[in-house]
Amino acid sequence: MSPHVLIGEAIAQLEQRYTLRADKQLEALIVNHFTAGALDSDEFKHYCERARRVAERRKEVA
């Protein structure tokens, strides 16, 4: 499966139910795909920013 699909699904799940564990797993997923060469630097920044926004919104709600 495409790394973009995997990361997109993980972000969607995080939006539905935020947990610190899921946040760390998403971060690891993004980093692993970047270091494996499946993501370029712009894609890496894009996904990190999306994950950051989800975490920020969830922390505001809590």
Image (cartoon, rainbow, N blue to C red):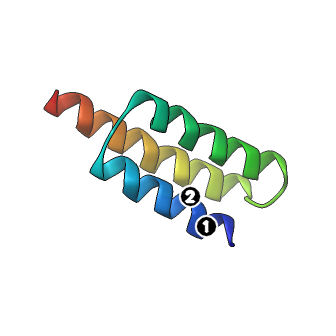
Classify residue 31 by image quadrant.
top right
Q: Report x, y in % for residue 21.
A: 48, 30
Figure check: 20 above or below 43:
above
Residue ID at (57%, 69%): 5
Instruction: Tell me the kind of residue under disc 1.
Output: His
Tell me whether circle 2 and circle 1 mark residues in contact (CB < 8 Å): yes
Q: Residue furthest left?
A: 61
Nearer to me, 19 or 61? 19
Residue ID at (33%, 39%): 18
Q: Is residue 60 left or right of residue 53?
A: left
Q: Report x, y in % for residue 62.
A: 17, 27
Nearer to me, 15 or 57? 15
Residue ID at (84%, 56%): 37
Secondary structure beneath dot 1 equals helix
**Residue at mark 1:** 4
Figure check: 22 above or below 43:
above
Q: Report x, y in % for residue 51.
A: 45, 44
Residue ID at (25%, 36%): 58
Secondary structure beneath dot 2 equals helix
Q: Is residue 13 left or right of residue 9?
A: left
Nearer to me, 26 or 48? 26
Figure check: 40 above or below 21:
below
Figure check: 21 above or below 37:
above
Q: Is residue 32 left or right of residue 42?
A: right
User: Badge 2, how many Cα within 10 Å: few under 14, some, many 20+?
Assistant: some
Separation of residues labelled 2 and 1 (CA atoms): 5 Å
**Residue at mark 2:** 7
In which quadrant will I find the N terminus?
Answer: bottom right
Q: Report x, y in % for residue 32.
A: 75, 45
